[in-house]
Image: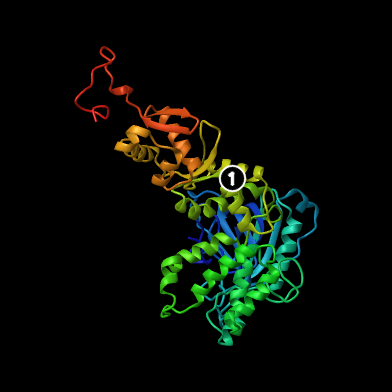
Amino acid sequence: MAANCLPPAQVTESGRPVLLPDEIESYLLSSVDLECEELPNFPILKSGLLSLTTHRLLWLPESIAAAASPSAIPLAAITHIFSPKKSLRAMWSSPRVRFQVSVSSDGRVIGLGSSSGAGSRSVVVTLVVRGKGDIDAFLAKFWESWRGRAWESQSAVSSSGSGPVSNSQPGPSSSGLYSSEGTVRMVGVSGILRKEQEMWESTDKSLQDAFQDLNALMSKAKEMVMLAEKMRQKLLSGSNSQTGASNDEEMGSKQEMQDWMLSIGIISPVTKESAGALYHQQLARQLADFVKIPLEKSGGMINLIDIYCLFNRARGTELISPEDLLQACSLWEKFDVPVMLRKFDSGVRVIQNKSHSDEEVFARIKTLVTKPDALRIGISASDAAMTLGIAPAMAKEHLLTAESRGILCRDVSPDGFRFYINLFYEFDPNDVYLVKDYGVYAK
């Protein structure tokens, strides 16, 4: 198992890596082998996805059914990166990247925050890139992330006693993923809010002064900042505050507010620059993770246009096109993800959970249309939307689908569509005037 030698890596339901706080993906390579002949307990890692971040090298199996488990090599454990060999043989073989890694006396790769110890030594690990990818661009990002030492700054904050450690702040650098002040450049509104919160907690400045700086950065997103301020006031206020009792009822639980903050911004969005040929594949996996919270709030189904707006808002400046979104959604049927893209007969496309049951929705609609008032005047899409807890446009699609199944009938008038229970099944074709003693028509 990889855990015998390498630290394990966590992945989401869609197979995307779970990143550390402020950890950002830098580059992706497909069909990569990890080899180390000097360690007998080094796992067999073949043809996986390699993700380079500001903190780690992540090796992920390309399929969930693979025997190998997700593994990580902290950049803090790397002591040297070898320059690639230029030879005639190297031109015809798979590109290889070699680097030295510190291991403990029992052969384990030293993780973040671990001391090397007296019995530590260095071994050479080789990346064999069998897929297509720009090796020179990967090497440049590899050197940049390793020299940036993004994992060191937070340990310095911890030693000064300023608060909890998140292993997230980077070291000095001046280009690429790092700013001139030596901090990781944040992506989207979520990154800006996270950076500002850490500054407030460490310097003990007033909330109002901090938000003046944030408003200067976010002059084009005032509504987002106002929402973030309300949530941040609740998160920073103590649980013993008496004045916060009414706000707790209004805003919900602390976990719910954290979920809202996650929907505001994605710290490390998948980009064409970092993913290359894997762009749409990784975008599809990240989108599958993102839509879970919006689907929970919209009854298990949401319009594709609404997701396009929410997803682009969360990505900040890294916007995607409608074609990219549609292509990413169409790839879901190739992956084992809990969501799917659905197209109604009217042409409307929606995203829904695979566990979403039409039969359950039809049962609730049938209960609604058999109420006494609905038997007389029918129901509209707005009536169904209130019962189902979804948007009227989605409710109308459900009503039309129920009509196609023979459950409902509709009446089109200047007032719009009105839907009624289908009574034709209760009529006897031999005696259409017979009113039976049972059924909806008898009522």
With respect to residue 125, does 242 lie above or below? below
Residue furthest to the left in view is 437
Name the residue located 57 percent from the left edge and 48 percent from the top edge: 306
With respect to residue 217, does 264 lie above or below? above
Q: Is residue 97 visible?
A: yes
Name the side, left or right, on which 319 lies relative to 298: right
Picture coordinates of residue 436, whole percent (x, y): 21, 23
Q: Nearer the viewer, residue 263 or 289?
A: 263
Picture coordinates of residue 380, whole percent (x, y): 43, 37
Mark 1 Cα shell of 10 Å, populated few (<14), some (14-19), many (≥20): some
Picture coordinates of residue 202, whole percent (x, y): 59, 82
Q: Nearer the viewer, residue 172 or 257?
A: 257
Q: Which residue is mark 1?
A: 305
With respect to residue 266, does 398 lie above or below? above
Name the residue located 56 percent from the left edge and 33 percent from the top edge: 347
Picture coordinates of residue 218, whole percent (x, y): 68, 66
